[in-house]
Amino acid sequence: MKKFSIIIGIVGSLLLLATFLFPIWSIGLEAPQYPGGINMYIWINQISGDTPHTLQNVNILNHYVGMKSIEPESIPELTYFPYIIVFMTLFGIAAAISAKKKIVMTWMMTLVIIGIAGMVDFYMWEYDYGHDLNPNAPIKVPGQTYQPPLIGSQYLLNFKATSLPHVGSYFIGASFLFMGATYFMLKKANKSQNEELEDKK
Amino acid sequence: MNRNYINLIALISFAMLTIALTSCGESKQSGAMTASGAAEKVYVAPGEYDEFYAFMSGGFSGQVSVYGLPSGRLFRVIPVFSQDAEKGYGYAEETKNMLMTSWGFVPWDDAHHPQLSRTNGVTDGRWLFINGNNTPRIARIDLTTFETAEIIEIPNSGGNHLSPYITENTEYLVAGTRFSVPTPQEDVSINEYKEKFKGTLTFIKVEPTHGTMSVAFQLLMPGFDYDLAAAGKGKSHGWSFFTSYNVEQTNTLKEVNASQLDKDFITAVNWKKAEEYIAQGKAKVMKTSYYHNVYDENKQTTISYKKDEVLILTPEECPGVVYYIPTPKSPHGVDVDPTGNYIVGNGKLSADMSVFSFDKVIAAIEKQDYEATVDGIPVLKYESVLDGIVLQPGLGPLHTEFDGKGFAYTTFFISSEIVKWKLDDKSVVDRVPCYYSVGHLMIPGGDTREPYGKYVIALNKITKDRYLPTGPELAHSAQLYDISGNKMELLLDFPTIGEPHYAQAIPASKIVPNSKQFFKIEENNHEHVTKKEADAKVVRKGDTVRIYMTTIRSHFVPDNIEGIKIGDKVFFHVTNLEQDWDVPHGFSVMGARNAELLIMPGQTRTLYWEPTRVGVYPFYCTDFCSALHQEMQGYIRVSPAGSNPDLKWWTGD
């Protein structure tokens, strides 16, 4: 039982590494003259699109309303976030091997805090892109800002912007659930151990 | 009483008018099946794709137009042999050389027969070849970009009508001279036709990976008029068939004099045998002069190569290469059925049609069953190679295509109709009228091993009353017939660009996946490319000024230029930095005496401009690119000759 819970915990920690293989978030823009839409993908270490030129095309559109150019090099999170993921993976493996409920719980709480902090950070970037507009922009619509939603869809002028978690996020969620399973198995194991002890008494 | 009388007259008049109008409507035949039935078959809903691409030659427009079938919608006109101001083709520095010939710059031609490239006898969707008649040429169009990629001039030819008639694996294209001429050219009396005039049949090799063309060899033939051709298929692969008329070898009033003999010839050429003679060194080198223009996609520029010799084979010296099949009365088209066995001779002045059998041709050659020899070329015995005769199918047979189900479809120019007949027993099974005077016809894949026998298109020369009148000059037309059933049924009638001389069609699925959306800027190695706005500049070297300019929605860099003066030679090297589908930019400058540039995303195009007036002149984007397209403009200042203005350029503050 204990061995199994350790394995589940290690597997769960390793699942975090999938964020190097899949984006964690996607933002899609839909308008009639863009068949198939324009889709951007946010990874832990980069921003990509359907084609190598998606960002250039989004930036061309954005400059009309005065939005700043999206330049992945200027977003520090994309540089240090991979380290956080690697740290959490190693920490998770250590926590699983320790087979200590408390350490496992600490790992889970840390992941939740990182998740929330990540969302807040993402929201702030979105807010900044959507609100910090060049006053000399060719197209100015009074009161209009261009912040995409955190999750869900919203119309930004002629574009329907849809923001959703992507595969990487599901792996983070799965990682959390795996570690949760480890936690409960450890708890149960401890409990039965205690019961055994009590029986012996 | 009086009022009743007037009423009666009014009533009678009305009735007569009604009858007149009704009968007037009836007098013009629509020719189509019930309108709603036909409409349903050609309706392609908005946003849906057509099943086939049809490539129609533009005839005397010199271009190729691209239509969808069954809708008949026009998608694009590909500039080939004619300058096209709309696209800057033949005006921009990068495409001008495509129209270079040994005669110099020739900005027009008469484009007749498109041919799709083939693999194993079926179209493969890689290239489209087409001939230029007047200044003998063949062009290759790249079907990933729908742009002309190459043009090769045909030496020793008096007019390239019989062309390009491709072989089964795109090994060769052919080019037969329509007019025999002194070869090599010399100053002789036209009355020395019989002695001095020769015809050439040219074989153009196609490089299998890139499609690059080269003149492989020429057969020096008797001075006939060479008309049309077809390559063998399957069992007849390795052979090509050519029609010739004017076997009389007359040089004046040909309409009478070249129509005297009962039979002219279909020339059968064993090109595999010819290859053996070439390998043995039997060909002679003849000095000549022709151009070969190739678009270098990497450098985005057309390079012209001047060539000066060609290999010549003479049939007399190469037995086994050329045979004549006697064919009644000035055959026009020669067509080989999908099995490769039946060779249909369309004797345009004959009442009947002769169908030959390839098996019988081979047997006759083996038995040396000849009826004569002309200039060392054996003439096979007509009766020995004839498979059968289609008796009196119509008047003026021109061309035949096949549906792959055992039927042939032949056009009749004089009786203006398509006749469907059975290949095995030569019986006529159906006929439909064409509006009017049909020339070629086209079944998608109908000249290949695997026809898509669903539609036939009649390519008509005359339209008269078919469309709203447009003054003396009227559009030519194409007519689409459903041939999936026993009876041919007219579905659609649509106008075309220039003369829709001949056409080819291919399932869209063979082209769509390879269609290029834009050119990658990192692969643009144009000599004068500007890959980012920061690199835009103006460079003077003597009186040559090169402006390295970029376009991206919705501005030019630079958009203000000073320091140009009268007498300068100005080159606008404009690079479109866009990397998205369907975002071309245009460029035009006031006073330019050529055309606009139309620059695809990732492309560089160059406009040459000689400023002639002092002042400040605008330039602007001509292709509606964005919401701020109208603002996409700039100024160039021109100072007087002999002045010494500073070279300056900028965009924004």
Image (cartoon, coloured by chain):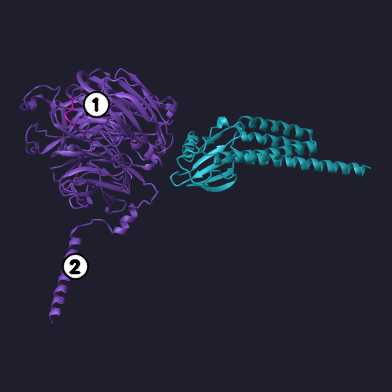
Q: Residue at 23%, 21% (x, y): give it.
A: B311
* Image position of B521 (left or right of B89): right
- For disc 2, the chain is B
Numbered mark located on residue B513 in the image: none
- For disc 1, the chain is B
Q: Colour of chain B?
A: purple
* Image position of B416 (left or right of A158): left
Tally the marks: 2
Q: Position of residue A78 (x, y in %)?
A: 60, 32
| Quarter of the figure with residue A200 | top right
Q: Is B537 situated above or below B440?
A: above
Residue pointed to by mark 2? B18
Residue type indicated by callout 2: Thr
Numbered mark located on residue B100 in the image: 1
Q: Main secondary structure of the magenta part?
A: loop
Q: Residue at 90%, 41% (x, y): give it.
A: A197
Label 2 to label 1, Cα distance in Å?
61 Å
Q: Colour of chain A?
A: cyan
Q: Position of residue A115 (x, y in %)?
A: 67, 39
Q: Nearer the viewer, residue B173 or B430?
A: B173
At numbered mark 1, what does the secondary structure look like: helix, strand or loop? Answer: strand
Q: Is B509 situated above or below B613?
A: below
Q: Is A122 situated above or below B536?
A: below
Q: Residue at 24%, 24% (x, y): give it.
A: B291
At numbered mark 2, what does the secondary structure look like: helix, strand or loop? Answer: helix
Residue B215 visible at all: no
